[in-house]
Image (cartoon, rainbow, N blue to C red):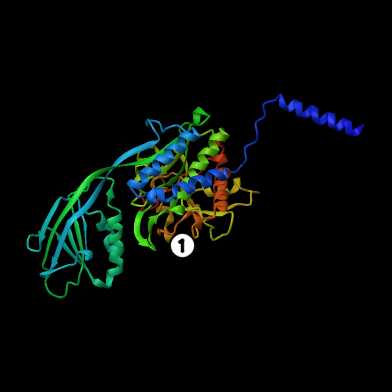
Amino acid sequence: MKLVFLIVLFVHTALLGLGQKKTPALAEGVAPSTVERVERALASDAMLGRGVPAGAAKAAQFLVAEFERIGLQPLPGLSSFEQKFTVFETRTTALFVQLNNTTVPKDKTLLISGEPHLNWADDDQSARVMVIGAEANLMKVLRPLLQPTENVVVFIDPAHAAAFKQVADYVKHSNLRAEKPGPYSVVMALAAVGNGAVKYRVAANTAVRPVELRNVVGVLPGHEPDREAEQVIFSAHYDHLGLIAKVAGDSIANGADDDASGTTAVVALAEHFKKRDDNARPLIFVAFTAEEIGGLGSRYFASQLNPQQVVAMFNIEMIGKLAKFGPNTAFITGFDKSDLGTILQRNLQGSGFRFEPDPYPEQNLFYRSDNATLARLGVPAHSISTDQIPTDKLYHSVDDEVETLNLVNMTGVISAIARSAKSIVSGQDTPTRLVVEPGQAAR
């Protein structure tokens, strides 16, 4: 009899359940299948390393399709998910430098200019002459010259050959500017001046053309209208280096960790919060372009927002490998600059996951990623990462491939971001604003 009673009870309960609309509880985590699919797509050879502008444009199309699939809305004021803006590409088409009647080899010269033609000589006072000796701090001296405010000819002691090559590679790779280049130029030459008078000649041509770039931005409107001016941003940069020098026949810098991993997180988080459909505050999901060449995408994006209406920014940068603290950990840059990290830690109690302060303060990571522009405007904008950057030998190489990532741990990091952000998304917590540090004003 007891067995019959249990069977009848089971059947009755099952039938009762068939007549009710059941809403399955959403898991705390993001979908592992989405994480792997998006990561593999963004880091595939077909994306050509997501270099700006060619490869990045293809990646942008993929991300637009993802935002459409998820059901996000365009940013108010835009008719699509593409936030387009114009920058200016400068290309040196000719450069001739002569020092004391000797021609400096082309690979030891560098031009930063927006002027169509230069024709300088030592006797016409067209430019100021700088001589950088072997003992000087080259990077410190050259940094302000990368944005010319006067005409300068710089002769650099050959002892700085390695550093000069780094600067030259950076300038040639970062040939896009937010504003049209101004009327000043800087010419650099790696050449020994000697003890006599400096006699030089410079002739150069520069081509400038406008280039259209695009961020990909989607919005999940908040459910509480009185919180419309309390935006929460989840971001990452989708661009990478594109094609670089070949290594073992491979020239595609896939950027699986940098930053396909962060961009994957943005897509997975958008999908997660859309399914939850309970965000009180509006959520903005943005994939930035041109981070690798000066943060042009995030700078433009920030210029289109009112920073007073952004309560928090989660910028996600390289989360594909284990952090130095082990599995189920990540670090937050600028941890002590607001209480965002403290809020996230509190929301993760009992989860087995923890956020740590940035273990690499000497790297200045807080001001090296796309959070920096809004952080300089007082927004509690921080980057979340797991990369052991001082020892990461795959960084900016052709070997930054999906196979080097730990996708399980990466999915755990994204899930932790989703869980830890819940009280901010719901409006229960509001992180403290940042105090802008001296020398770090908005720029």
Q: Residue furthest right?
A: 1
- Residue 112 is situated, as x and y percent measured from the top left of the image, at 22, 55
Q: Nearer the viewer, residue 276 or 157?
A: 276
In the rendered image, is residue 105 in sight? yes
Q: Is residue 135 left or right of residue 43?
A: left
Can you tell which quarter of the image residue 127 is in? Answer: bottom left
Residue found 70% across the figure and 25% down from its top:
20
Quarter that holds the N terminus: top right
Q: Residue at x 39, y 63 (%)?
A: 248
Q: Badge 1 is on which residue?
A: 392
Q: Compared with residue 226, is residue 104 higher up or lower down, i.e. above or below? A: below
Pinpoint residue 255: horizontal percent, then vertical percent.
43, 53
Label 1 SS: loop
Residue 434 is situated, as x and y percent measured from the top left of the image, at 45, 47
Number of numbered discs on residues: 1
- Residue type marked 1: Asp
Which residue does the image show at 45% across and 49% down from the upper left? Answer: 260
Instruction: Residue 136: tell me if it is visible.
Output: no
* Residue 16, above or below 170: above
Depth check: 38 or 388 in front?
38
